[in-house]
Image (spheres, rainbow, N blue to C red):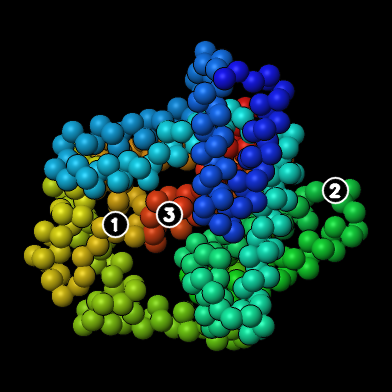
Amino acid sequence: MIFHTSQIDRIYQYLLIGSIFFLPLTVLVNNVLIWTIVLIWLFSGDYLFKFQQIKKNKLALASILFFGLHVVGLLWTENIGWGIESIRKMLPFLFVLPIFLTIARKEYINYYLYAFLIAIGISELCSYLVWLELIEPFGDATITNPTPVMGHISYNPFLAFAIYLVLHQLIFVRGMSKLLRTALTFFVISMIFNMFITAGRAGQVMFFASLAVLIFQFFRESQIKATIISILVIIVIGFAGFNYSPLFKNRIQQVSYDIALLTTNPNTSIGHRMVFASNTLEVIKTSPIIGVGTGDFPSEYTKVNIKNTPAVKSTVQPHNMYLFIQAQLGLIGIISFLWIFYVQFQIAYSAKNQFIHHAGIALPFLFLIIMLSDTYLLGHFTSNLFILFSSFIYSRQ
């Protein structure tokens, strides 16, 4: 099957815009569009040119290497079935990110960007309709935690990144029409309010971090001024959220409550994460260089858990991306993983386009923060958010 270059590129762009639009809305349609692009790319010929494109992109090579280490990790894995499942979850690093880096075009950034923001607007509208009790809760939503389209663990990071993108447009884009500027201003205010009526703590941390990133990018000539303003903005918004959002206040108080109970009752959200981290460090000590293998984390963790913390449930992942990668693939794996982010920063710092420079720094920085609290590159929504935005931010096209 051979397509004319302009014809196939047009198909790619429609499918890519569609996949970004449906990402916050539906897993099925998002997956169908993504893997349709992959299949067209794989069966449309011109393989030498495609190979050269991937070879020229450092991020594509870093992504393929990271996936490849998971395959190699099967060699010392006893649980092959779980290892294959882990590799399945990592397939986007072999196919989607490298391929999408070759088809995304910087001249279409606004199409990609606004497709995502319109979808977030639809998702946010559903959230408000549930919260205002105008429609019955659906999906994972409740009236007190209205996240119907995806769970709050994923929804709030999406919301935080969308807030960053809209604020970036408002602050840095010149020549914007008054109507669009007014619409985006209303949109960002509504998203910030929505952030405090939904329960994703990692997303809320990501939101405050995104504000700091924007302030440092705006006051790039004065880090002292940026630091002071960042602290003040975070304190003011945090104080307002704590005093006017019962859900946000409850989630903050729950953290201190969980920490206070840590020694007597570790079966809390924070307690579980602390135990998971402690036990995973013991797993890491058994094989610090190459890890326990791609599929053996659940069984190796269970052994440690039975010995150290039998009263706490076991887990198949420690809710920390770094510990999970290091436990499975050792020092070699974590270096490969962090190399992806190093390459992203490297490309962003050298970019002449302001949006690429700023968003290219914000994306990896924000993910590096939230991955301390969960394995966000294993879940569908957040891993595809990372991959789809990486595809056009770090594309050479």
Q: Nearer the viewer, mark 1 or mark 2?
A: 1
Task: Give coordinates of residue 206: x percent, y percent.
Answer: 54, 61
Task: Give coordinates of residue 69: x percent, y percent.
Answer: 30, 33
Q: Is residue 90 left or right of residue 314?
A: right
Tell me which residue sits at (15%, 75%) in the image.
311
Q: Amino acid at mark 3?
A: Gly
Q: CA distance from mark 1 to mark 2?
A: 45 Å
Q: CA distance from mark 3 to mark 2?
A: 36 Å
* Mark 1 surroundings within 10 Å by alpha-carbon count, few (fewer than 14), some (14 through 19), many (20 or more): many
In the rendered image, which quarter contains the N terminus?
top right
Tell me which residue sits at (54%, 74%) in the image.
138
Nearest the eye: 51 or 260: 51
Figure quadrant of residue 161 = bottom right
Disc sitting over residue 73 in the figure: none
Q: CA distance from mark 3 to mark 1?
A: 12 Å
Task: Give coordinates of residue 225: x percent, y percent.
Answer: 67, 58
Q: Amino acid at mark 2?
A: Arg
Q: Which residue is mark 1?
A: 317
* Mark 3 surroundings within 10 Å by alpha-carbon count, few (fewer than 14), some (14 through 19), many (20 or more): few
Task: Give coordinates of residue 204: x percent, y percent.
Answer: 54, 68
Name which of mark 1 and mark 2 comes first in the sequence: 2
Disc sitting over residue 174 in the figure: 2
Disc sitting over residue 379 in the figure: 3
Name which of mark 3 and mark 1 comes first in the sequence: 1
In the rendered image, which quarter contains the C terminus?
top right
Tell me which residue sits at (25%, 32%) in the image.
72
Is disc 3 placed on a helix, strand or loop? Answer: loop
Q: Amino acid at mark 1?
A: Gln
